[in-house]
Image (cartoon, rainbow, N blue to C red):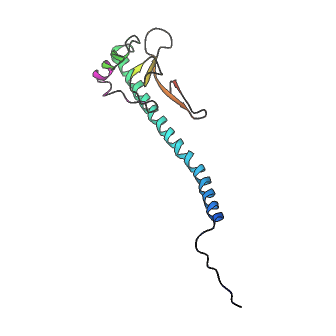
Amino acid sequence: MNIRRTIRKGFTLVEILIVVVILGILAAIVVPQFTNATQDAQAGNIKAQLDTLNNQLELYRARNNTYPDTDDPWGSISDAASMIGGGYLKALPVNPFNGQSSVGDDPEANGWHWYDSNGDDIVDSIGATNFDESTGEITPGVL
């Protein structure tokens, strides 16, 4: 009897499919963790920038005995001349969620927006765009 030995070279289709499925499961577990890390970094960045902006508003109030007027916040809505030129800020920081650095009362059109909670035309606080991790929505608000 002549017995021929067959030598297997390579992998079978089943073995390749098993490896692909395992890699897919691992990718599904790992990729969302990187996405959350990016969002956490952006949220930390925006909180630090808001702290800086609010601290500079308090400094403005201490020097001028009032907050900036909401009719013309920071001297000019378009370039925030009195805050930048007045030594409070070198430049307005960019909001990492919407890429804008403008200031105004419309949160959809500006990177940063001011709040006048009691209607006295005085800036009460500075806000920015919030990212809600549970819903995935980006909404205006104070952080």
Residue occupying image coordinates x 49% and y 9% = 119
Q: Is residue 121 above or below residue 30?
A: above
* Spot occupied by residue 3 in the image (x, y as percentages of width and height): 68, 87
Q: Nearer the viewer, residue 30 or 65?
A: 30
Please identify the quarter of the rendering in which residue 65 is found.
top left
What is the magenta range? 82-95
Residue occupying image coordinates x 39% and y 10% = 71
Q: Nearer the viewer, residue 10 or 32?
A: 10
Is 87 colored magenta in this rendering?
yes
Q: Is residue 38 above or below residue 121?
A: below
Please identify the quarter of the rendering in which residue 86 is found.
top left
**Quarter placement of the N terminus:** bottom right
Is 111 colored magenta in this rendering?
no
* Spot occupied by residue 28 in the image (x, y as percentages of width and height): 60, 49
Please identify the quarter of the rendering in which residue 126 is found.
top left
* Spot occupied by residue 34 in the image (x, y as percentages of width and height): 52, 46
Residue occupying image coordinates x 47% and y 14% = 116
**Is residue 135 left or right of 59 when viewed as pictured?**
right
Q: Residue furthest top?
A: 120
Q: Residue furthest bottom?
A: 1
Q: Count up the numbered dots.
A: 0
* Spot occupied by residue 8 in the image (x, y as percentages of width and height): 61, 76
Residue occupying image coordinates x 40% and y 26% = 53
Main SS category, magenta section: loop
Q: Residue furthest right?
A: 1
Q: Residue furthest front?
A: 2
Q: Nearer the viewer, residue 86 or 140?
A: 140
